[in-house]
Image (cartoon, rainbow, N blue to C red):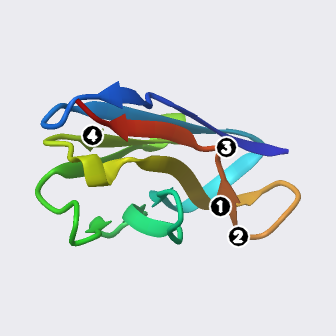
């Protein structure tokens, strides 16, 4: 069994910062990529940032220069540092990973989601 567990969401004022964390646990053998998506009310889920193994990160245009994704491969973890937050960043943020486990070849896994609300 593989699980992705997120933490770090919450309520923050415009211009503030939050740091999201996500750790993959269970029978993980190898991780190809980790990243974050988000879904705002009434909108489709969209990619925020991704960090493939052995390659540079990719960001949505809307968060470039404000968000930074990083990974700790020893901990099977990914982080999203979010600065200069705007009300339009309000959404449920989902961690995902494409990984290989002891029971399955490479496939995507998703976390349960963490709410980020940017409001004064």
Q: Which residue is drawn at 32% across and 46% down?
A: 70
Q: Are marks 4 and 1 in contact (CB under 8 Å)?
A: no
Residue 2: % across, % down: 77, 46
Return the disc, 2 or 3, that comes first in the chain's sequence: 2
Q: Do the residues labelled 1 and 2 touch (CB within 8 Å)?
A: yes
91 shown above or below 63: above
Q: What element carries label 3?
A: loop
Return the disc, 4 or 1, that comes first in the chain's sequence: 4
Q: Residue under circle 1? A: 99
Return the disc, 1 or 2, that comes first in the chain's sequence: 1
What's the distance in space between the residues labelled 4 and 2, CA to CA?
A: 27 Å
Would you call the spot at circle 4 few (<14 residues within 10 Å), some (14-19), or many (20 or more)? some
Return the disc, 4 or 2, that comes first in the chain's sequence: 4
Q: Residue under circle 4? A: 81
Residue 30: % across, % down: 63, 57
Which image quarter holds the C terminus?
top left
Q: Closer to the observer: label 2 or label 3? A: 3
Residue 109: % across, % down: 69, 58
Q: Closer to the observer: label 3 or label 1? A: 3
What's the distance in space between the residues labelled 1 and 2, CA to CA?
A: 5 Å
Which image quarter holds the N terminus?
top right
Q: Is mark 1 on a helix, strand or loop?
A: strand
For residue 106, the mark is 2
Q: Residue at x 88, y 58 (%)?
A: 103
Q: Closer to the observer: label 4 or label 2? A: 4
Q: Which residue is drawn at 52% across and 67% down?
A: 45
Q: Residue under circle 3? A: 112
């Amino acid at each position: 069994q593989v699980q992705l567990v997120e933490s770090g969401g919450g309520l923050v004022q415009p211009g503030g910062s939050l740091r999201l964390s996500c750790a993959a646990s269970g029978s993980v053998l190898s991780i190809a990529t980790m990243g974050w998506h988000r879904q705002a009310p009434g909108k489709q889920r969209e990619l925020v940032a991704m960090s493939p193994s052995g390659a540079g990160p990719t960001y949505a245009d809307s968060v470039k220069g404000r968000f930074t994704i990083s990974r700790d491969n020893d901990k099977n973890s990914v982080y999203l540092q979010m600065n200069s937050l705007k009300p339009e960043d309000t959404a449920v943020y989902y961690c995902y990973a494409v990984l290989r486990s002891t029971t399955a070849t490479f496939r995507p896994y998703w976390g349960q989601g963490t709410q980020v609300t940017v409001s004064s």
